[in-house]
Image (cartoon, grey):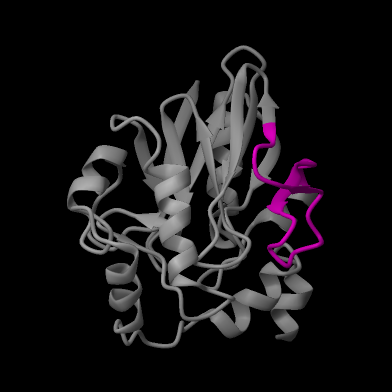
Amino acid sequence: MIFEQFFEPDTSTFTYLLACEKSRQAVLIDPVECDVEKYIAALQQRGLTLVYTLETHVHADHVTAADTLRKRLGSKSVVHRDAGALCGDLLVTDGIHLQVGAVDIEVRYTPGHTNGCVSYFTGNRIFTGDALLIDGCGRTDFQQGNAGQLYDSIHHRIFSLPDDTLVYPGHDYNGHTVSTVGQEKRGNKRLGGGKSRAEFIEIMANLKLAYPKHIDVALPANQACGNLAVKQSA
């Protein structure tokens, strides 16, 4: 499998390129609008055809490149059916498998940060979006967030994987690029060390986080799969 990790520094967002070496079919997980040219250059350099853009959720901190890539490259936008983005070409549910050449990608429903969050599992890697971060997790105080639901999602759908499964998050703010399920189960400051559901809910209730600075632009745009007209009128 071909794999590349991109980082957008303004919003500390990771985007992931996965592709089949034989078919040259590719997907991008959580592409960011401002990095479209970077993605297209990488695809062209490798001789890849973009089949899908996969959203882990409707983002509040950046505008997705899904609509732009769909228009320019003919890719299909994939979002969970409860994400609030009916513009998606494929509205997926838990347990759906996407076949990209020889690469099999399983959709795992991991709500709690928002009610439409999914993680994508393939091989020994899971792409967790904002559900599970390295030494942290997504906030649960907006977009139908629910701390108890997030705790259950992470434990049932991510921590249930083998300890050596690689964890690739949607963001990192401290220079990390990858973790493992075992590392997060042991040391995650919000979830690790066997913290109970009640302890986690209390931690999340007392974070006192600032209002997301890009949400008023990003959220309506992403509910339209990153449509630029929606973004500009927001």
Determine the image quadrant of residue 83: bottom right
Outermost residue, top side: 22
Quarter holding residue 26: top right
* Residue 141 percent across, percent down from the top left: 46, 80
| Placement of 216 over or under 49, stated as above or below | below
User: Please, is residue 115 above or below residue 19 in the view?
Assistant: below
Q: Nearer the viewer, residue 109 or 63?
A: 109
Is residue 80 on the magenta stretch?
A: yes
Question: In the image shown, does 38 or 196 lie closer to the viewer?
Answer: 196
Q: Residue at x 61, y 42 (%)?
A: 40
Q: Position of residue 115 (x, y in %)?
A: 61, 66
**Between 108 and 212, the one nearer to me in the picture:** 108
Tell how many labels. 0
Place of residue 127 in the rendered image (x, y in percent of width and height, measured from the top left): 47, 43
Magenta-drawn stretch contains 226: no
Identify the residue at horizontal 44%, vertical 67% (top origin). 148
Q: Is residue 14 left or right of residue 218?
A: left
**Residue 129 visible somewhere in the drawing:** no
**Span highlighted in magenta in the image:** 72-97
Q: Report the quarter where the C terminus lies.
A: bottom right
Q: Is residue 26 visible?
A: yes
- Decide if residue 103 is on the left or right side of residue 10: right
